[in-house]
Amino acid sequence: LALWSVEPVVRRLEPQFTVANNLACRGLDHLEEKIPALQYPVEKLASELKDTISTPLQSAKSTIGNSVDKIL
């Protein structure tokens, strides 16, 4: 019943949906060209991001620990 009642609206708006979809696809294509990492699998991105963040955090933790030890 819901599908039947919405069908005329969807049919009427179909050209606008098509235009919006095409614009969105072109926008995503443009982003993928500018940011190639968007094409990588999520697992690879997460792993690289973890490595990128953890090294400076480890360094900061060590520096703060050494400073506290010196103060004490």
Image (cartoon, rainbow, N blue to C red):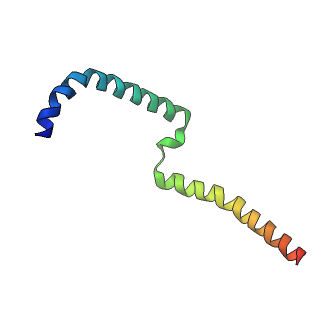
Q: Name, please, the residue furthest toward the bottom.
A: 72
**Which of 51/21 is in front?**
21
Closer to the camera in the image, 72 or 39: 72
Give the residue at x 59% y 58%.
Answer: 50
Q: Residue at x 17, y 32 (%)?
A: 6
Q: Quadrant of the C terminus?
A: bottom right
Residue name at image x 53 percent, y 55 percent: 46
Query: In what quadrant of the picture does the N terminus appear?
Result: top left
Residue 2's x, y, as percent?
Answer: 14, 39
Answer with left or right where residue 40 lies relative to residue 61.
left
Q: How many marks?
A: 0
Near-viewer residue (61 or 30): 61
Q: Quadrant of residue 67?
A: bottom right
The answer to which image quadrant residue 35 occupies is: top right
Residue 17 horizontal/vertical position (percent)? 30, 26
Q: Is residue 11 above or below residue 58?
A: above
x, y (%) of residue 36?
A: 53, 39
Q: Is residue 27 left or right of residue 65?
A: left
Residue 60's quadrant in the figure? bottom right
**x and y percent of residue 23 in the render?**
40, 25
The residue at the point 65 percent across, 57 percent down is 53
